[in-house]
Image (cartoon, grey):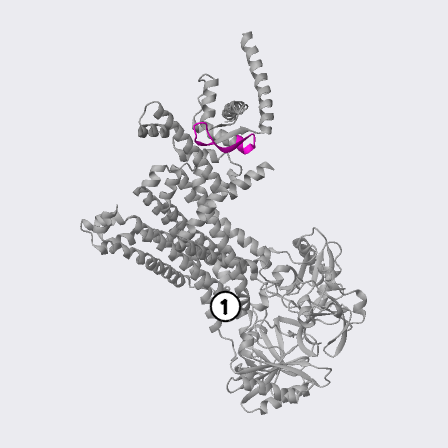
Amino acid sequence: MRRLGRLFRNFFRRSRVEKDLSDELRGYVDELAARKIAQGTNADEARRRALAEVGSVEVLKERVREERTGFTFEAYVLKPLQTAVRGLRRSPGFTVTAVVTLALAIGANAAILSIADYILFRPLPYKDPDSVHVLQMRNRKTGTLYMQVLLQHLEAINAIQGDLSQTALADGAGSIIVTANGESTRVPAANVTANYFDVAGVTPYRGRLFMEQDAEEPGRVAVLTYPAWIKYFGGDDRIVGRPVQLGTTSFELIGVLPPKFVFPSQFIAPAEVIRVEAAPRPGEGGGTFQPIIRVRPGVTRERAQAQIDAAMAGLIPEERASPALIAVPDALYWGRRPAVAFLFGAAVLVLLIGSANLAIMLALRAKRGAREAGVRAALGASRVQLALPFVFEALMIGAIASTLAIAAAAASFKLLLAQVPEAVYINAPVGLDLRVALITFALGTLSGIVFAVVPAWRSARRDVQTLILGREEQVLRHGRVGGVLVAAQVALSVMLVFEAMGSARAFFEVINESLGFDPENVIVAQFNLRGNVPNLRNMYERAALAASQEPGVVSVGATHQMPLPTNGPFDTMKRNGEDVGGTGLVLVLPGYFETVQIPLKRGRLFTWEDLQSDPGAAVIGEAAARVAFPGQDPIGATFENSKGRRFHIVGVVGDTLRPTWTEPVAFIIGEQGLLTLVARVRARNESMLAAVRQSMSAAAPEAIISARWFEDVLGAQPRLRDPRFQTLVLGTFGGLALGLMAMGVFAVIAFAVAARTKEMGIRMAIGATPASLVRMMLRQTMAPVLVGVAAGLVAAKWSRPLVETYVNLNRPVASFETLALATAAVGIAALIAAFVPARRASRIDPAITLRAD
Amino acid sequence: MSKEKERTDLLRGTLDLLILRTLELRALHGIAIADRIRQQTEGTFDVPAGSLFPALHRLDEVGWIAGEWTTSPEGRRVRAYALTSSGRKQLALEKRQWNRIAGAMARVLEES
């Protein structure tokens, strides 16, 4: 109790305590002096002797203070904190620069970390996620993966006894109209087998998930993802177990998936409504299954794959493609994990550069604060006490900067996310959460502490005299530390700018790459049937006719699959019952090639009469012609689709943009299933879009039609968005790196000029010209810059394979040009940053300078 | 290090005991305490300000003595320290301990 009272008194009535102490000691000295006077010494002498006997009153006071309750906290926390706050407030320029520097560096990390966290580090929300794998087909020749797992393969795999425990299937099911609160929305859907969520190991958030009985009568029950439940039903608990209108049918909504659930495949991942379907029976259907397999606990993917290979080897010896087990994150973020890791690495580089800046600034600041530290040392402060304010300054800078960075990242996160390649990254429930915020905060404060250690240690080591008087050689030594840091910054900047430029090149190459068609002024209309339509062809013909009669429409066509980099072929091409190099088939209706302007190379295009012909008509791409008919004239040749229907080839067209993971395509005529109508108009304007959509809707009332510009659809594709995103991120990082590096160079030179003012004054007095002084300063700083550039070039050369793989999307980098450009950019930025403060040297007036000290 | 610390602790303890004992009869201020210790020990212990004031404040912080502003017989405004009740208990305790140690030391020294 008494202790607490003392603590209270010592902290809150401090001035009173201090005054008491002063009075007490003064009384002591007075009395001592009075005695000496009484002994016959004169007053002044008596006082002098009394003081000499006591020694330094300040040191004595400090020793008394050490006895006080709470002294440790006060001396080692409160006081240095106050000194640090005072120091930061006294030099707002330094504080703001340091905080902004660090905040930028940390902000870059926070943003990337929040994406990387999900894609790289966080386990997927399945039970025992390492035991769940995705089954895809790997082309044995090219190594490419695709989704079409053949049923006979699946059966062979299901027959394996032992390490594989369960297989479940999922399939993208296009989209479905959800009617909620009187509003109809088109929602991406998926079908799964009843055991799917069991195999994945997912527990429902609300209600229940599918059971075997549900599959016996499919089309009765449905499950929603959490986001869909929130979006369309406002997270209403009462909706669970109630009927909802999906398309034309009423489904019972039996449950909601947990918030963080993600389908283990990027193609089903967007699905929001999930229906159940019966597992296909032997000999029935092909389709694009996306099976997942759970292996028994402890079984590695390699071991399971070996068993699958063994089963395949016996059953389908001559097959070109074989099933492959893929880790879920690899399937989900398809090739993007290394790219994200790369971006994350780049963000760490930015943090390093920012930290080097902070280190430079803190070191220079410690030098400036040396005099004050000297005075405090003379007043009895211990070395630890001298060093502590630096640590607290850095800590505060780190804390403020990371708070700012988190706030800024949170505020701008939506913006960043808008640029994130949807089809790939959006699958991750990316967001700025507490975890990321905490890591960011730790990152900021940690870098603060690390870089405070050097200046703190230095200030603690020096003796009082050096501190107060200052020494030239110490200035020079600080210059050397600055030089090393600048060299490191320059090296890292060269690397980052090189990466950014590599990415930018890839982006422009993609933009300029030949699509094989012309998306300009093309409207893409998608049909969603309101109910069962007995004669689909008739509906499309009506809609196409109506659209073509709209003034301004040049031509109209239809296809099953737009030439998008994410769209795979619909069917496969076979000759004499055998797959032709995995060549894919795409269904189109007449007018399609003319509308998207895929050029005819040989033969002719489709006409409406071709729809009646038997065998059906086909038009193949040039690449497909090379693969399927090497050295032959394909015109007039025949082939079959997977169901054995025969086609004869009437023409050859130019190749179009296609997914990197598919084979060349051929086009067959037909109208089976859902189609996309395309219409070319004379000029792009929004009223045209509305007019075309309305005329189609009027002609085809059995469908809900959504229309967009092909260019917009294409622009949203990952093939374009990925490099755009990377360029955006790396460009920002490169810019940050340049700016931070320039700040570092500026700080070092500005300090060197200030510290050597006297020397410059003397040099000028003995005849140095201002220009020669500027040159001297520049020479001195350009040395570390050159060292840095050299190191950066070596690092960039070393990182080139990484850049080519992850940033440049497997395009060879014309690395010499890019590297030269990056080096030039960094060099020029450093030169400008050095020149501005160096010029101050020329303005030194020797008369004033020499008088100053 | 620990040896050193023990020795200073012993010395500090001795000074504390001397101060507590000095204040047993009446409250005194800083310089008067030093005077009294010097007189009583016939000059063996000359307590300088650098040891005296930290010790006084230490004893004050733990509550064995309490400082109070008063006027000295010479008419000065001084901070006089008085023994508190817990200080009295502490003094008794330390006296016993000291006597035990001193007795033991004396016996050892007489034997040789």
For image coordinates 58% across by 85% down, the residue present is A690
| Residue A670 showing in the rendered view | no
- SS at mark 1? helix
A769 and A590: which one is in front? A769
Amino acid type at image mark 1: Arg
Residue B69 belongs to magenta span:
yes
> Which quadrant is home to the N terminus of chain A?
top right
Q: Quadrant of residue A93?
A: bottom left
> Looking at the picture, how far across and down is residue B44, in whole percent?
45, 17
| Residue B11 x/y as whole percent | 50, 23
The residue lying toward the viewer, choosing from A255 and A521, is A255
Q: Is residue A749 left or right of residue B62?
A: left
Q: Residues within 10 Å of mark 1 (few under 14, many from 20)?
A: many
Is residue B53 among what the camera can see?
yes
**On the rendered image, what quadrant is the C terminus of chain A found in?**
top left
Report the front residue among A609 and A81.
A81
The relative height of residue B56 versus residue A516 in the rendered view (above or below) is: above
In this picture, which residue range is highlighted in magenta? B59-78
Residue A99, x across and y down, in percent: 45, 55
Residue picked out by circle 1: A724
Q: Is residue A283 rendered to the left or right of residue A832?
A: right
Q: Is residue A231 above or below residue A852?
A: below
Query: Could you say which is closer to the camera, residue A164 or residue A685?
Result: A685
Q: Is residue A106 above or below residue A83?
A: below
